[in-house]
Image (tube, helix red, strand yellow):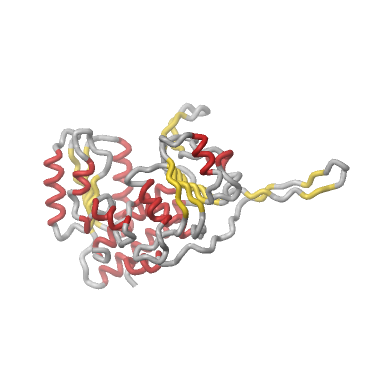
Amino acid sequence: MALGSLGFALLRGRLRGSAPPSGTLRGAAGRGPAGRRECVLPRHEATVISGTEMAKQIQKEVQQGVEAWLALGHERPHLSIVLVGDNPASHTYVRNKIRAASAVGICSELILKPKEVSQEELLDITDQLNMDPKVSGILVQLPLPDHVEERTICNGIAPEKDVDGFHVVNVGRLCLDQRSFIPATAGAVWEIIRRTGIDTFGKNVVVVGRSKHVGLPIAMLLHTDGDHERPGGDATVTIAHRCTPRAQLKTQTQLADIIVVAAGVPKLITPDMVKEGAAVIDVGINCICDPMTAKTKLVGDVDFEAVRKKASFITPVPGGVGPVTVAMLLRNTLLAAQKVIY
């Protein structure tokens, strides 16, 4: 079975049963007020979800899909990446994508442009790539310079080659529960939840962050009907954002079975905001100065060490959602080559 068909077949499964959490057991025997011994139940730490290991499995599936596609006599999938300017983080992300594409057998090309490039020139580039039959998928690395309208550039990519899922057609199809290219980060969160066996059916979910590329598509995936063409998680979803008062945010997260955080605020989610046994997916990526070493380090939006003592599942930063995001981009590229969506 081609990966495209397999991927959608797997997504048909509704997430009704969760896997029991595993982790380090903590506990001790104590004495009651009258001196009698009483049992203190062992405390479970969260299962730390390794996005790195999950990404390896997804990339293996994509590689097998590429090999099967080539065995049928088709062209090798081809990903074109447009990178503007000299943002170090963007260059790092693109290098990771190119390296991962090569590892699974997907051809890639990098089109570098200076930060002064005009919007018209970028649209000319996307037009040429749209018309090139050898190009399966197109990705314009964001953010773009201030003088370039990101929405215009994203909509300049043909929907059938829009492997980032940012074109208005793909966004609309996602909202209508139809097959579409799902933004890679949102797809990564969904895949982590699905593969880990975290139950979403009828559960309370809080998504912290409302960006068009991350927060909103995550909410769409989690709340929609599991029996539709593009099955969702059947959850009850609340979206919080920067205008949500912290007291209200805390009230909502304390009720949540699943918390997905994509706000870009270090240690936004603290243990007092999380109920026992909740699953916590940390999408945030923040650079901070480590007070112990005075060196820069990456952290998420969750107070990881403290929250892991209450959660059932938690993703680390780095090594959580990030690697799976790259793997989902590769899957989208294969789906674009197979033309199973459009």
**Front position in the image: 141 or 160:** 160
**Which corner quadrant holds the N terminus?**
bottom left
**Front position in the image: 331 or 31:** 31
Residue 3: in sight, yes or no? yes
Q: Is residue 90 above or below residue 190?
A: above
Residue at image x 48%, y 36%? Answer: 268
Q: Is residue 340 above or below residue 240?
A: below
Q: Position of residue 262 (x, y in %)?
A: 42, 42
Answer with left or right where residue 264 lies relative to residue 213. Answer: right
Answer with left or right where residue 45 lies relative to residue 64. Answer: right
The total number of labels drawn is 0
Answer with left or right where residue 124 lies relative to residue 342. Answer: left
Q: Is residue 333 above or below residue 34?
A: below
Answer with left or right where residue 190 lies relative to residue 79. Answer: right
**Which corner quadrant holds the C terminus?**
bottom left
**Front position in the image: 128 or 18:** 18
Quadrant for residue 263, please give it. Answer: top left
Residue at image x 41%, y 35%? Answer: 243
Q: Position of residue 155 (x, y in %)?
A: 20, 49
Residue 325: in sight, yes or no? no
Residue at image x 42%, y 55%? Answer: 223
Q: Position of residue 117 (x, y in %)?
A: 15, 36
Q: Position of residue 317 (x, y in %)?
A: 46, 43
Residue at image x 37%, y 58%? Answer: 59
